[in-house]
Image (cartoon, rainbow, N blue to C red):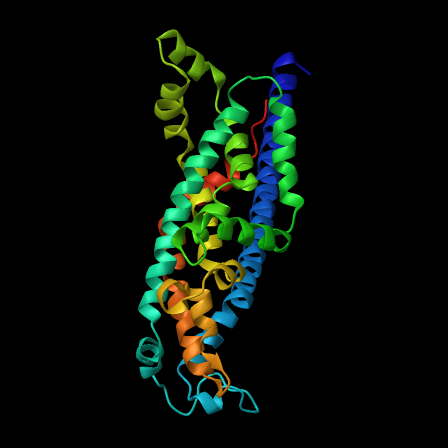
């Protein structure tokens, strides 16, 4: 056999092998594609089922707000009542000073969030970016306050507020929760993930710690600030025990959680109005979460990943 025929035979065999390998690779890719599609479908179905489970109580509460009061606990239970009473949402504002409750909650939530942001960002910067003696020991003691239940602090805080003469005031509703270890820890972890070279370059150009904090660190921390803002606002918005204790005149300084409890009295509970009021109270927080959704996802994904 000549060398040319041997070469042609090898070329033919090699070409057939390449074709076979190509077909096999395409089949394997098709199998992987089908498997990925199946996994993607299963993942979407699981997400939809989980979302349905979490949303179903809210849906039931919404339709319960439209039922007559005597049908709320009817047996067997029904999703939709005999009639849709949209007037229940308007009756909420006629039953008591509900606008006052909303205004107080908004003021306390916004003011408390601003104070917490100022305190947490500055404290987080001091613990995460500045070097000073005893920093780590003080930070550990600061974190130790997270292990103390809030219920344990209610009586001492009330005594302090009474000593300052702040009982039944906005100061008592806001300032006791202005210094949170959670917010400081969150901002510290995020700040430590920012390259130190940026701050060092600014200091070479003559920027001090305050200028570096305001012009470099804070602009790069919008996502973490958004996460802390939402968590803090929700904490103030949903707070019930402390406003109930420190507030005397609920008609003037009552917040929404305290106002929701006013639908229960010695003559019974207006469950229809209470459900309607609960739905109304969820609107501001829902809008806040939707507005900051992009920053929330990014901030939760990045917070805590630093730590040099």
Point 57% across, 55% down: residue: 43
Residue 66, how many percent across, how many down? 39, 82
Check the image and report above or below for 233 versus 261: above
Residue 101, how many percent across, how many down? 37, 65
Q: Could you tell me if residue 303 is visible in this image? A: no
For the C terminus, give its image quadrant: top right
Point 49% across, 30% down: residue: 123
Point 39% across, 29% down: residue: 218
- Report the front residue among 182 and 32: 182
Point 47% across, 39% down: residue: 299
**Residue 151 in which image quadrant:** bottom right
Residue 41, how many percent across, how many down? 54, 57
Residue furthest right in the image: 1
- Report the front residue among 252 and 20: 252
**Residue 143 in which image quadrant:** top right
For the N terminus, give its image quadrant: top right
Residue 226, how many percent across, how many down? 41, 42
Q: Could you tell me if residue 129 is visible in this image? A: yes
Left or right of 214 in this view: 164: right
- Report the front residue among 289 and 245: 245
The number of discs equals 0
Left or right of 78 in this view: 251: left
């Amino acid at each position: 056999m000549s060398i040319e025929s041997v070469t042609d035979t090898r070329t033919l065999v090699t070409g057939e092998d390449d074709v076979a390998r190509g077909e096999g690779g395409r089949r394997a890719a098709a199998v992987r594609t089908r498997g990925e599609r199946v996994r993607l479908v299963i993942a979407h179905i699981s997400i939809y089922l989980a979302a349905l489970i979490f949303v179903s109580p809210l849906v039931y509460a919404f339709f319960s707000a439209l039922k007559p009061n005597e049908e709320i606990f009817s047996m067997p239970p029904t999703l939709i009542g005999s009639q849709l009473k949209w007037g229940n949402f308007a009756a909420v504002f006629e039953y008591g000073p509900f606008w006052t409750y909303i205004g107080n909650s908004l003021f306390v939530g916004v003011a408390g969030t601003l104070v917490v942001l100022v305190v947490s960002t500055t404290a987080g910067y001091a613990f995460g970016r500045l070097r000073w003696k005893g920093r780590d020991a003080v930070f550990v003691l600061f974190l130790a306050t997270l292990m103390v239940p809030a219920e344990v602090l209610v009586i001492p805080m009330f005594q302090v507020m009474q000593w300052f003469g702040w009982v039944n005031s906005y100061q008592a509703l806001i300032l006791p929760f202005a210094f949170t270890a959670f917010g400081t820890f969150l901002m510290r972890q995020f700040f430590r993930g920012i390259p130190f070279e940026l701050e060092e370059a600014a200091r070479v150009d003559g920027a001090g710690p305050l200028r570096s904090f305001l012009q470099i660190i804070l602009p790069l921390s919008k996502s973490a600030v958004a996460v802390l803002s939402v968590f803090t606002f929700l904490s103030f918005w949903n707070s019930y025990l402390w406003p109930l204790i420190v507030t005397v005149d609920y008609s003037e300084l009552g917040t929404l959680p305290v106002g929701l409890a006013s639908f229960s009295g010695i003559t019974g509970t207006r469950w229809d109005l209470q459900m309607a009021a609960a739905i109304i109270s969820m609107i501001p927080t829902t809008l806040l979460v939707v507005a900051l959704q992009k920053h929330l996802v990014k901030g939760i994904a990045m917070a805590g990943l630093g730590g040099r």
